Image (cartoon, grey):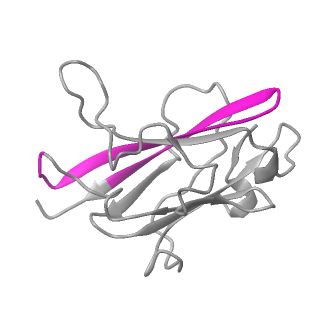
Amino acid sequence: MWLDHNRIGRGRIAAAQTPAAGGAVAAGTAAVLFPGGTGVDPAVLFTVREAQSYQYEAHLVDGFGLPVPPATLTRLVLTLTRADCCPPDGVPIIVNDRDHQDVLSGATPDVLVNPQGLLTWVLSPADVTIGPPVRRYARHRAAFEFAVVGAAGRHAIYFDIEGGG
């Protein structure tokens, strides 16, 4: 089971004028990332501007390429961390309190999966922040972990944030 970006035109992260409305597609494309994969897929890297809203979309599909509807999911969590720095203790810096955040229950309206398996995450300005320390650039890593009975997967995207600091 994995997030299949090819089914929506290679995946995208788009600027959002409001949390519900999409805008122009930002630079970057995404590729299929299989469960158990390691390392950074350079195709799953986007560039965004600090303190703006964005929308990320990808399809959740099973091993046969069929959509995974939300009713079959037993787990869907999101962790958002700084990917460009780490404190001396090696513990990742969590961004916007998204530390293994349960996004399946519907309590988090900014992450949804529709009946066709389309995962949509509306990134808020708090998700797209640079500091501290304040500087001109930061890289964040968003990791989705998901499961159905008998199968599980993980998908990560990276986004570089450009700021004015």
Of 123 and 109, nearer the camera is 109
Task: Give the residues in magenta.
Answer: 133-160
Residue 19 appears in the figure: yes
Of 126 and 3, nearer the camera is 126
- Residue located farthest toward the top when viewing the structure as drawn: 89
Q: Position of residue 17 (x, y in %)?
A: 43, 81
Asked if residue 140 is among those painted magenta in the image, a careful observer would answer yes
Residue at (49% x, 78% y) in the render: 24
- Quarter of the image holding residue 1? top right
Q: Quadrant of the C terminus?
A: bottom left
Residue at (75% x, 58% y) in the render: 7
State whether the magenta stretch is mostly helix, strand or loop: strand
Of 126 and 60, nearer the camera is 126
Q: On screen, 125 above or below 31? A: below
Residue at (52% x, 38% y) in the render: 41
Q: On screen, 121 above or below 104? A: below
26 to the left or right of 72 = left
The mark total stands at: 0
Q: Position of residue 158 (x, y in %)?
A: 43, 46
Asked if residue 81 is among those painted magenta in the image, a careful observer would answer no
130 to the left or right of 139 = left
Residue 68 appears in the figure: no
